[in-house]
Amino acid sequence: MMKWCRIGILLLLFAASVAVLLMDLVSRCHTPAGAGHTQRIVSIPPAASFRRIVRALEKQGIVHDPLAFRLAARYLGVERKLKAGEYDLNDGMTPMEVLDRLYRGDVVRYRFTVPEGAALLWVAERLERRGLGRRGRFLGKATDSVLLNGLGVNGSSAEGYLFPDSYFLTRDMTEEAIIRMMVRRFWQVFTPQMKRRARERGFSIHQVVTLASIVEKETGAPEERPLIAAVFLNRLARNIRLQSDPTVIYGLDHFDGNLNRRDLQTKTPYNTYKIRGLPPGPIANPGLDSLMAVLYPAPVDYLYFVSRNDGTHHFSTTLREHNRAVWKYQKSNRSIQRGAKKDFQ
């Protein structure tokens, strides 16, 4: 009888010890490494082993009890399910909270905004400047015909289809993934109703985007966009050259900020002083207002416009009226102004 009592007491002591150990482990799994004063951006590379992840977290001061962290991960079954990426962590987080964030892939996201009228090259350069992509790789992917065809882009580049919006990017995103995100946003905005409207007006989507990009670059005044669009559409209908300065600038290899007569005489596919009709593709990434302006232009007969030098334009129906406006608004300025249409004959 005494023997069984001793065995029972030993079992109880063992069970109590196990319970204490488990309670201690649970406590350690819910105890942060510090008071939350240490903030770290921890980068977990792709295919990193669990051991490597633990070492990185310990080195950064996010985990102070590697054993408890390992046991917690094993208990939760997430040792091989932690996701690569860049994480914003602090020493006030418990091991369980750190594991949860790495398991969910709650990585740092950087806000990147494409403004209306930004060109493809601008996007590529700003991404590189922010450390979110490489300029060359981005431009290479943006002209990849296989990728473009898969995204429904009927053009030689993604110019015009990187929709102006704010995007939240991660460091580990590829240039292709970023392009896919921006082009998908374009197709979310360009609705079936807009597609039908384009067909009704006799334009392809690519033509609409191309003209919208010119409208976007011609004026910063939102209320003028339907008027600018109407001018260009009226000129297209009459087979009159568009003579848009922004298209000329886009086609130049180098532009010093001063558009001169030699630039206007330079033959490029984008020089609408030389070619008739639309250029081969967009010259920037237009926003929704410019797209809608092309699809729903103002019901006017204007064929000309000239800058008032205050961000707005004077619109004219006849060449005589236009020439008077040019004299009024541009006579004191010897350089060619953006948006000034001086001789359409």
Image (cartoon, rainbow, N blue to C red):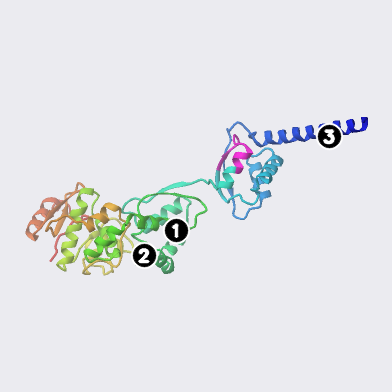
Q: Nearer the viewer, mark 1 or mark 2?
A: 2
Residue type (three-letter) at the residue carrying disc 2: Val
Which quadrant would the N terminus be assigned to in this image? top right
Q: Residue furthest front?
A: 1
Which quadrant would residue 46 be assigned to in this image?
bottom right
x then y, percent, for residue 248: 26, 63
Q: Which residue is mark 3?
A: 11
On whether residue 264 falls in the magenta region, the answer is no
Residue type (three-letter) at the residue carrying disc 3: Leu
x then y, percent, for residue 237: 16, 66
For the point 8% across and 59% down, the residue is: 318
Q: Say whether disc 3 or disc 2 marks the residue closer to the N-terminus.
A: 3
Q: Which residue is mark 1?
A: 135
Q: Is residue 121 left or right of residue 313?
A: right
Q: Nearer the viewer, residue 33 or 196?
A: 196
x then y, percent, for residue 181: 42, 56
Q: Which residue is mark 2?
A: 153
Q: Residues within 10 Å of mark 2 (few under 14, many from 20)?
A: many
Q: Nearer the viewer, mark 1 or mark 3?
A: 3
Q: Is residue 61 visible?
A: no
